Amino acid sequence: MTTLAEPGSGTPAAFGSLRLRWGERLAGYPYVLPAVLVVTAVMSYPFVYSIYLSFRATPSYTTRTHFNGLANYHAVLHDPIFLHSLLTTVIWTAGSTIADLLLGMGAALLVDRLRWFRGPARAALMLPYIVGYVVASYAWLWLYQAEYGLLNDLLASSHLISRPISFLSSLTWALPAVMLVNIWKTAPFAMIMFLAGLQAVPEQTVLAAGLDGASPARAFLEVKLPYLRRVIVITSIVLTFQNFNTFTIPYIMTSGGPLNRTEIVSNYIYDVAFTNLNFGRAAAASVVVMIILMLFAIAYAGSLSRRPPGVV
Amino acid sequence: MSGRRWIRAIPAKIALAFYLLFALVPFAWMATASLEPQTALYRRHVSYLPNPFTLANYAALLRANPIAGTDFPRYFLNSLIVVCCTVVLSLLIAVPAAYGFSRYRFIGKSTLLYGILLQSLFPLVNFLIPLYIVMQELGLLDTYPSLIIAYLTFSMPLNIWILKSFFDGIPVDMEMSARLDGAGSFRAFVEIAIPPAVPGIVATAIFTFILAWDEYLYALTMISNSAMRTLPLGIFAYFSEGVPNWSGLTATAIAMSIPVIVVFLVLQKYFIAALSKGALKY
Amino acid sequence: MADAAYSRRQTLRTAGLGAAGLVMASALRRGALAAGSQDPMPGAAAVAGRLEAWDWSDAPYVPGEEAQADFYTKYFPSLYKNLKFSSTILGYTDMLPKLTVAWRASNRPDVARVAIAWSPQFVGADQCAEITEQELGIPFDQFLPGALLSVRRDGAGTGPLYGLPTNNEVMFLLYNKAIFSSAGLDPEKPPATWEDLAAYSKTIHDKTGNYGYGLCAAQNNGNTPFRFMPAAWAYGGQIFDELSPHPTWRTIGLGDQGTVAALALYNRMFNIDKSVQPSALSDNESNVETLFLDGKVAMCIDHPSFAQQVRQLKPDLPVGGAMVPSGPVRRAVVLGGSNIHIRATSTNKAAALALIRAYLSPYWNARLGTGAGSEASTAAARRSHEQGLLSKEIPFNDIVFKMLPYGVNVPLVAEGAQIWNAIVPQMIQEVLSGRSTPKDAASAAAGQVRELMAG
């Protein structure tokens, strides 16, 4: 999970000239060195080690590994479950992110209009985000339960079904069901971002639009939306990566089932490593995923930097 | 005028009510379930009020239950230690780093900065496998350091980025004048730059706290000794020993959520500042 | 790590013994140390030097922990005063990785107890010392033949032993007598064959609306094959050639008609009769147990410790126990348990053997086995007086003892984890979800195993 700051942001020009005058080319290093060392040790080293592992065969009964070229990659890229999990992850990410944005925007607009109830409403709507993935997973696991869950109870009481439906066992409904949990948990993040963005919209513009007789809904959106474009883009980037990297929800709720319908790449990599005990293949899969994500990141960064600075 | 506006606002109020319901119903259910005995949950129709009512599940949290394999006080302590150490360690390293990235220009700055960002985009599971192997070789599995170190994979990049935004938002004038007066760079940093950044530091600390408190994947992999479990794993314990005890589980879930909820409610504005500052500052 | 390999969480239940067990255990304990220390040990003074042993425990589990602690810290050291003995008790999921590393790098610990499915890795890497009947002093026919497979090279049926079973466990069939009665079935006549089980399941569902058989079919979960393979084996199906007394683990049996027949049985119960709970595809044993407790499911296969839990949580539920049903070919159940090994390069084999001898003595074999939620590995221990006392606390223990000889091994190969946890459940899910016929699903699974073993 990350919050992105606009690249190239921050330091005003005045400070720049000051630095040049003092010639402190090296002054910055001591500040960043500990962090760089830590990140190298904890992230870069594992990253490189993954790549190393991905080219080795790792039999589960020994810690001796040997080089086996591209065999792991071949296995992974030809594994129908891996390819399916990529597809599932794309659906999961796109679906969750879009729903998050819509729900978050809706909630933000509604909460923004409140006066005295605003704080409590905002806090209540933030609860799903605060309590974390684990609590969310278990709560919804029971709600979806076939025999005793709330959803089945409601459906049965309204006489819509005669036999309990196990949502998490259904080939068609399992993925939407777990996606709903993810949306439930992450939409508040979008709401908060949009709320902050809505704060930044100048009062005068809003009032002017209202006085011009524009209908509240459409005009608000067409007046406020341009101000929110930046927030929307950044929020969607953050959510995209956060959703792509989810692990907990499918793991706890369905273990990736039924028939891999809810297996997203994080679960796949974990299963290959810790259920099938094949670290080399898992490393290969994780390298493939990293390459995909890097391409995305580069594309996003490109689109961000093309945006003219200071736009409102 | 105001009457008509109020009426026109009704659909919005209904929509808001639906949102609130959607967000809160799972919690309402959890609260109800936690106040009922274990066997009461298994019935045809869901009861929205605890029936029968009991505080036994919460009472059970106060002590270890070796037979059921749960030990809430112990798990709470483990989580507290791991998360607090993570927050402190992250901040100690990230605050200077963010300051350095914000104020200074040096060779490789962009590379380092974007490198850190890039790596934080990867799924945690990617780092997990090599870290697990390393921890195994070092004999650090089932220890606090294994988790604290592993948590740095998400807390460090996050902290650096949020804090950098906060530092960027603090005008450099005061530091400049202090430097011109002859103060050393470090003194300027500590005495001039940090005080105004304290809200940002607090915000970052809260955010890290909330993320680390719920962290499941690393804990699941690094910790197998039940005495070292953190809270998210502690909930899992309710499943692994036979018939799942949903009442106990929901009571644990609620008890586990209380610290983060309290932290959030009390320090809401800092938390929201962290979220939005990090992204909106430009 | 959850669900690693053949997760012990599925083979061992811990919550069962409960309060009554505590009282029983502490009573036994007082008599224990005195009784145990009367075993005559040949040449006790000669056993000297150093010895290091690793064991594991599913703590917190009070009675088992106590027994282990007593054995390692009180009883054994008291036998051999000249021996510098140290023992470490690890967590279950920590044992394998730590031991793998330790034995790769050094020859300590000298002795280690591991789950049955881990033995092939150590035996196969030539890290275990051979143990002969003479050295040990306990006849090998005391042990279950199936258990001995896992301590031979390549899981073979004959050859030298590189370790010894310390405890074994199997599951059995539990059923709800009240539901049987209300469905018109004789509550004292549980289903004898899998066909009967399917028929009873249908009757129960049709007549009472409850589910007949509680089925686990979750993927990436060891519980699923633990209940399916007994059915497959009963019909003569197998993954490799584990049903033969001398398995080679090279021929792939998956895809044969036995497996297909078992899949067809599952399909009939789930899709045609609809007498199984609809959430089977995402259920592991926890949900089935929940439904059984609630009286919604009439039959399920589970461990003895679940029967104890039922007794604790719902004492008025009339539970019956039966052997796992048989099929046209045989009766079968998964054989679980643990083995104890000596490091091949250990410098103190005499002391190691002494430790194992003590561990396997009837009194301790019984106590440690039961303390682990399991059963003693030697016949002598199972017949012993202590076992008799312990068995009083464990419902249906007699049935479990009767099932022990029918135990069949999980695949004793390196790829076993993936086959067991991923390929077999997938095959079952293909059939239950209606996407494949039993024949196609079984052939597909066989193909996957073939690829896996080749690559």
Image (cartoon, coloured by chain):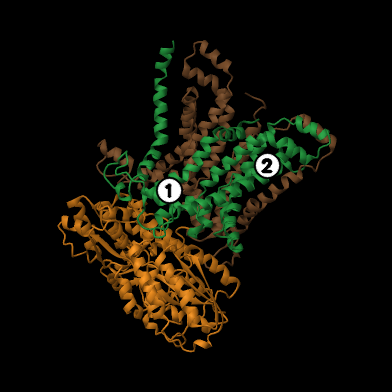
Chain colours: A brown, B green, C orange
Q: Which mark is residue B95?
A: 2
Q: Residue C366 placed where, x, y %?
A: 37, 75
Is label 1 in a helix, a strand or a loop?
helix
N-terminal-most mark, 2 or 1: 2
Answer with left or right where residue A89 lies relative to residue B277: left
Q: Quadrant of residue C393?
A: bottom left
Secondary structure category for the residue under label 2: helix
Q: CA distance from mark 2 to mark 1?
A: 34 Å
**Residue C319: percent from left, percent from top:** 24, 61
Is residue A46 left or right of B238 when viewed as pictured? right
Question: Which three-letter amino acid code belongs to the residue tagged 2?
Answer: Val
* Relative side of B104 to C348, left or right: right
- Mark 2 — on which chain does it sit? B
Q: Amino acid at mark 1?
A: Thr
Determine whether A118 is above or below B183 in the image: above
Q: Residue at x 48, y 55 (%)?
A: A271
In this rendering, does residue C340 appear at all?
A: no
Foreground of the two, A25 or C264: A25
Q: Which residue is mark 1?
A: B252
Front position in the image: C410 or B278:
B278
Residue B40 circle label: none
Q: Could you say where residue A208 lies in the image, as x and y percent from the top left?
A: 55, 13
- Can you tell which quarter of the image residue B193 is in? top right
